[in-house]
Image (cartoon, rainbow, N blue to C red):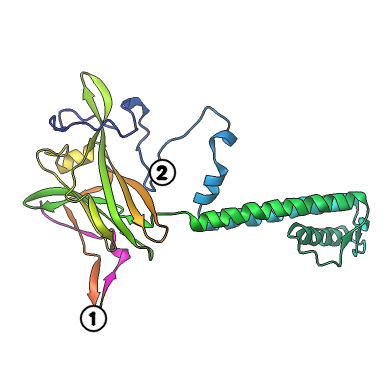
Amino acid sequence: MSVLKNRINKKKKANKQTGFGTNASNYGGRFINKDGSANVKKIGIPILERISWYHTMLNISGIKFMCIIFVFYLLVNFVFASLYCLIGVEHLNGIEPSAFVQNFGQAFFFSAQTFTTVGYGHISPVGFWASFVASIEALFGLLTFAIATGLFYGRFSKPKAHIKFSENAVIAPFQGGKALMFRMTPYKNTNLTEAEAKVNLGMIVEENGIEINRFFSLDLEYDKINALTLSWTIVHPITEDSPLYGFTEADFKKNNGEVIVFVKAFDEMFSNTVAISSSYMFSEIVYGAKFSQMFDDEDDTITVLDLSKLNTYHKVEL
């Protein structure tokens, strides 16, 4: 990050409660990723200790989650089918020993029936070892399905802020001056109320010859709204009290900074508070632009919110 010198309003008090620290040498390109996750890589302990698999399974995409479940299901049945073949398919009553591929296929489907506790009954284990493996697989299947059911429930019941942010922020005309603006909107049929936003500006500055991280709370035109049903444009007026006061288009291009956004709202469906965060680097701020309106009326009977226009803007003169 380029070091900003003599560009910060000295009257603006730094925010020391961000949790990011002041040591400029620990800066890794950005503090918060676009998806709201912290841009942090943890090392020093084994991977199994630093990763919560439960949280991972709840947070991955639905396609990845289903693929993991399917691959795990195939892998488990492959392992148990191999054990049945190792014991000998003659110990599975109802299977006529033949070619290996056919034997393995029959053992695989017997494993699937045992693992899911379906048990059609046309194949049954005979002897101690075959019965022992089948009983272990049945127990393993019950425990696995209990865990899978919990994960499915957790994914569906987890409160989540279904909010999208604009890809870019803009510097737009505002009340005879200019302001930093970005916007957000709910994209699912949720009912969010009491929405609240906090915005910080993070930069590396030089003080007394030492490079340090400095964070500033950005004053907003409105930091709370009663209901988040349409789009909400967050506006930071760039007044003399703003740390961005005096910044030109060239300053945004040649320097690096990060606008960090924290939003929380009350979701009436979950009867719980949901939160989301994101950030905008200076390179993602368009100087001299204004967002296009996202909503309009339809036959004077309903308001139509066009989500495809979330990041639509047009250039304007400042």
- Left or right relative to 317: residue 144: right
Disc number placed over residue 15 in the picture, else none: none
Q: Could you tell me how far apart the alpha carbons at marks 1 and 2 are, in whole angstroms?
A: 41 Å
- Left or right relative to 253: residue 26: right
Residue 96 visible in the picture: yes
| Residue at point 40%, 57% (across, down) | 271
Q: Which residue type carries mark 2? A: Ser
Residue 192 or residue 1, whichever sits in front: 192
The N terminus lies in which quarter of the figure?
top left
Q: Secondary structure at mark 1?
A: loop
| Residue at point 33%, 25% (across, down) | 23
Instruction: Assess whether residue 283 is covered by the magenta stretch.
Output: no
Q: Position of residue 219 (x, y in %)?
A: 18, 43
Instruction: Assess whether residue 313 is covered by the magenta stretch.
Output: yes
Q: Which stretch did the figure color magenta?
A: 303-318
Looking at the image, tell me whether mark 1 or mark 2 is earlier in sequence order: 2
Q: Residue furthest front?
A: 271
Q: Position of residue 265 (x, y in %)?
A: 33, 53
What residue did someone put label 2 on?
37
In the picture, residue 260 is in which quadrant?
A: top left
Q: Which residue type carries mark 1? A: Asp
Residue 82 visible in the picture: no
Residue 306 or residue 261, whichever sits in front: 261
- Left or right relative to 91: residue 270: left
| Residue at point 13%, 44% (across, down) | 238
In the picture, residue 315 is in which quadrant?
A: bottom left
What residue did someone put label 1 on?
299
Q: Secondary structure at mark 2?
A: loop
Q: Is residue 317 above or below residue 10?
A: below
Q: Residue furthest left?
A: 176
Q: Position of residue 285 (x, y in %)?
A: 24, 47
| Residue at point 28%, 55% (across, down) | 194
